[in-house]
Image (cartoon, helix red, strand yellow):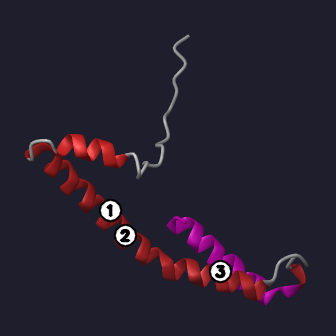
Amino acid sequence: MGDKSIAFVSKALELAAQNPILVPAYLDLSEAKKDFKLTQNLMPIEQELLTLLRAVEDVMMVAGSDVPGAQAVYDELSSRFPRRASRTIETDES
């Protein structure tokens, strides 16, 4: 969740608490607040893990280029840890 989304959800939960009549019946406000708090608590952990992942990827790249035969081992073992597909932007050249 980005900064703008966090601000939006925070404000929406605040306003929902102040105006309970406007809260849809299907929304459990206390559970929504718990979920939001959990998301806020997990975000710094996610950032630290992403930093660690980038560092591991960097070390693997260096190790693969410096140690004879390491690239073959890396290639074989990397199939166990597929990367997330990145978004590609298609262009129309017509």
Residue 2 inside the magenta-drawn segment: yes
Circle 3 residue: 35
Q: What element carries label 1?
A: helix
Circle 2 residue: 49
Disc 1 to disc 2: CB gap under 8 Å: yes
Which is more toward the observer, 59 or 90?
A: 59
Residue 77: x percent and y percent? 32, 49
- Hey, what amino acid is under mark 3? Asp
Residue placed at 83% from the left, 78% from the top?
A: 27
Which is more toward the observer, 58 or 89?
A: 58
Q: Is the magenta stretch mostly helix, strand or loop?
A: helix
Residue 2: x percent and y percent? 52, 64
**Residue 53, labelled with which disc?**
1
Q: In which quarter of the image is residue 44?
A: bottom left
- Hey, what amino acid is under mark 2? Leu
Q: Label 3, label 2: how many angstroms apart (C-alpha)?
A: 20 Å
For marks 3 and 1 on the same chain, the one whose residue lies earlier in the sequence:
3
Residue 49: x percent and y percent? 37, 69
**Which residues are drawn in magenta?**
1-20
Which is more toward the observer, 60 or 2?
A: 60
